[in-house]
Image (spheres, helix red, strand yellow):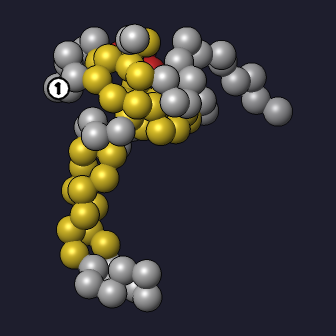
Amino acid sequence: MKNVEKYHIKKGDTVTVIAGDEKGKSGKVLQIVPQKGRALVEGLNLAKKHMRKTEENPKGGVVEMEASIAISNLKVSG
């Protein structure tokens, strides 16, 4: 089993971005990816993903979704 680091933020925390394109913005942590040292933050670092037509998504098309941000660029706020 790999050694997984312990981080200063947890799922559900409100965080502020301290570096990068989203600097100064804040949001709620949706998910932590400890293997990569990254986190998904609600409404930040949006990326466009091309979705195929499926039964769940009959229209398909381009969807904006959150991409991960390095945990080192986040600080707990609030």
Residue reaching furthest right? 1
Quadrant in the rendering for residue 7: top right
Q: Amino acid at mark 1?
A: Asp
Query: Which residue occupies 27% across, 36% down?
Result: 44
Identified at 24% across, 45% down, the residue is 46
Residue designated by label 1: 21
Q: Nearer the viewer, residue 2 or 7?
A: 7
| Quadrant housing the N terminus | top right
Q: Is residue 50 left or right of residue 5?
A: left
Answer yes or no: is residue 64 visible. yes
Q: Is residue 57 above or below residue 13?
A: below
Task: Decide: is 9 above or below 11.
Answer: above
Residue 59, how many percent across, how many down? 26, 84
Where residue 8 sits in the image (x, y, percent)?
Answer: 55, 12
Q: Most extreme residue toward the left, as rendered? A: 21
Q: Residue at x 66, y 18 (%)?
A: 5
